[in-house]
Amino acid sequence: QVQLVESGGGLVQPGGSLRLSCAASGFTAEYYAIGWFRQAPGKEREGVSCLNRMDGSTYYIDSVKGRFTISRDVAKNTVYLQMNNLKPEDTGVYYCTLFATPVQELCVPPVDYWGQGTQVTVSS
């Protein structure tokens, strides 16, 4: 049973920071990538940032480059998304995602496993 549990969301002012955490259990061996998708109200779910487990390479959607950083604590089996200089357009539900099969491109569906989501609201 794969379990992805997100935490760290909340309400923050524009320019503020949050760090999202995703604790993974039940499926850690041989997965290919892990990361974060988000869904804004009325918008399609999109890949925000992902980490390739095989080589450590990362992906960031253009709108968050230079502001977000994905990282992984192997010992804790946890992935983080450090979100700095947050903007209102970053608002949405953020989902931890796991890719169990080989990926041709990071942060592109299909996603094999989803967390329950954590709300991020950026508003003054």
Image (tube, helix red, strand yellow):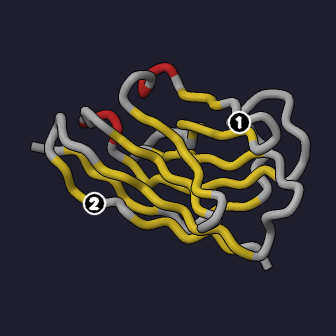
User: Looking at the image, is 124 positioned above or below residue 87?
Assistant: below
- Please state if 66 lies on the left or on the right of 28 as rendered: left
> Which residue is labeled 1 in the image?
56
Q: Residues within 10 Å of mark 2 (few under 14, many from 20)?
A: some
Q: Earlier in the sequence, mark 1 or mark 2?
A: 2
How far across and how far down the image is residue 29, in percent?
A: 86, 62
How far across and how far down the image is residue 47, in percent?
A: 59, 37
Q: Residue at x 36, y 29 (%)?
A: 67
CA–CA distance in space, label 1 to label 2: 28 Å
> Which residue is labeled 2 in the image?
10
Answer with the quarter of the image where residue 52 lies.
Answer: top right
How far across and how far down the image is residue 111, in percent?
A: 75, 50
Mark 2 element type: strand
Answer with the quarter of the image where residue 53 lies.
Answer: top right
Q: Residue at x 46, y 36 (%)?
A: 69
Q: Residue at x 19, y 50 (%)?
A: 12
Q: Amino acid at mark 2?
A: Gly
Q: Disc 1 vs disc 2: which is toward the camera?
A: 1
Mark 1 element type: loop
How far across and how far down the image is residue 50, in percent?
A: 63, 39
Q: Residues within 10 Å of mark 1 (few under 14, many from 20)?
A: few
Residue most toward the front?
75
Q: Residue at x 56, y 43 (%)?
A: 45
Residue most toward the bottom?
1
Q: Amino acid at mark 1?
A: Gly
Q: Nearer the viewer, residue 13 or 74?
A: 74
- Image quadrant in which the C terminus is located: top left
Q: Nearer the viewer, residue 54 or 109?
A: 54
Q: Nearer the viewer, residue 42 or 89?
A: 89
- Image quadrant in which the N terminus is located: bottom right
